[in-house]
Image (cartoon, rainbow, N blue to C red):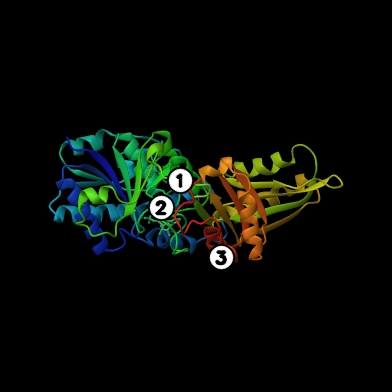
Amino acid sequence: MGKLVVHKYGGTSMGSVERIQSVAKRVAKWYRQGYRLVVVPSAMSGETDKLLNLAKQFQHPEVHDASYKRALDMLASTGEQVSSALLAVALLKEGVPAVSYAGWQVPIRTDSLFTKARIVDIERDRIDEHLALNQVVIITGFQGVDKNGHITTLGRGGSDTSAVAIAVAIKASECLIYTDVDGVYSTDPRLEPKATLKSYLSFEEMLEMASLGSKVLHLRSVEFAMKYNMPVRVLSSFTPADLDLSKEAQSGTLITFEKDKMMEQAVVSSVACSRNEAKISVFHVPDKPGVAFTILQAIAAASIDVDMIVQNVGKGAKTDFSFTVARGDYTQAIKVIQEIAPKLGQCEIQGDDTICKVSIVGIGMRSHAGVASTMFETLSRENINILMISTSEIKTSVVIEEKYMELAVRVLHQAFGLHLGATPI
Ligand code: ADP
Ligand code: ASP
Ligand code: MG
């Protein structure tokens, strides 16, 4: 029996009839060489935005409740249904037996957190039946169904997670994420043309990069892959569809646990950035136990994730408290804090959604002092003011004004020698 693999194709890769045709040719090539395949397409590029923008036109006054989010999921999930059906058509015309399914038909079961649901389990029987009939199985990315039969979506960029979760469920040998760049680079190659391509990357490093905003992989896809040790390869769908398969299968970036295959571990191996940030500060809150809890519990109760948290040293029984959230949650987070403000005394609330986060990442950082100070020095030379800082063993992140993001990425990339390839320890 041929090897079982999962292919995922992103929005740009599925962006037009010609692109879908090229995907079909590529899948057909793998199929004809004996591979068993499950293919997970994203919506055609721009489609999810277009659908969600339609809903925004009705959004007055602002609503955030579950029934509204449920409606958004019904809407957004249709983008992947269209591209999956079109890919089935293209494959059938290519002479390859193919069958397409929406996530709820498989089913891919999720929790009920509309717009950012988590996959709970995937039933593999139906997939297996079709694979046994030598068919290519196409499954919509980005979506599933909750225990009440409601369609859910997994958060923007979530098709990567669908693909990896399916690969885990059917015990595929590898999950190939086809996208519009050649693999994972030392930073976003669209911001820094001198970025260098990585052949191998550890799950740990990729996890950090994804969580810091490198949108090349959805964070939860990396979590899944790491938890179940599923090798993930990020590669281009823009190479010729008839490229030699053995060459294609080795191209791009392989993300695994296999340390021996890894490039030498760099002190700093990548620069990540994210515009998807907003900062909320609550000034003059009482400096007493329970205040951080009051603020953060209210935010968590609204299902909003908090990223960085900073509390100043108290002065005269008062202190200031700041935290960051995803930009999409900003308006709702401000509303939540305004609602609990009476519990926080004479406080003042200030928000800013024109910030961004820039981070340096590297497994080698854990044994090297002075990396953060090089980062701060590099930014200060450009007169970039740091608004917040957070560190872990293998990353240092700063929040800065959004207008400095590209500049910060480029000078840090240069300062750590990433244009030369990763600097080994
Ligand atoms: P897809 O539609 O295939 O899912 P995405 O747009 O979600 O593609 O992800 C690919 C994009 O990720 C690239 O076009 C690139 O601009 C961006 N990106 C950000 N950081 C990196 C990085 N370190 N390496 C490669 N691509 C990156
Ligand atoms: N179509 C969805 C989005 O645009 C999911 C994905 O592309 O992964 O976010
Ligand atoms: Mg993506």
Q: Position of residue 287 (x, y in %)?
A: 80, 43
Residue, far left: 95
Q: How many marks?
A: 3
Residue assigned mark 2: 184
Alpha-carbon span between mark 1 and mark 2: 9 Å
Residue assigned mark 3: 407
Q: Position of residue 419 (x, y in %)?
A: 47, 59
Q: Residue at x 22, y 38 (%)?
A: 3
Q: Quadrant of residue 175?
A: top left
Alpha-carbon span between mark 3 and mark 1: 23 Å
Position of 41 with respect to 390 (left or right) is left
Sequence-wise first label, 1 or 2: 2
Helix, strand or loop at mark 1 = helix
Q: Quadrant of residue 19?
A: bottom left
User: Which three-letter amino acid code belongs to the residue tagged 3?
Assistant: Leu
Residue, far front: 425
Position of 248 with respect to 110 (left or right) is left
Between 247 and 90, which is closer to the camera in this rendering? 247
Callout 2: CB less than 8 Å from ligand 1: yes
Q: Position of residue 106 (x, y in %)?
A: 30, 39
Residue assigned mark 1: 206
Q: Is residue 345 placed above or below 353 in the rendered structure?
A: above
Q: Residue at x 25, y 53 (%)?
A: 85
Does any portion of residue 406 appear in the rendered image? Answer: yes
Asked whether disc 1 touches disc 2, contact meaning CB atoms under 8 Å apart, the reply is: yes
Q: For the residue carrying disc 1, how many other residues have a C-alpha within 10 Å: few (<14), some (14-19), or many (20+)? A: many
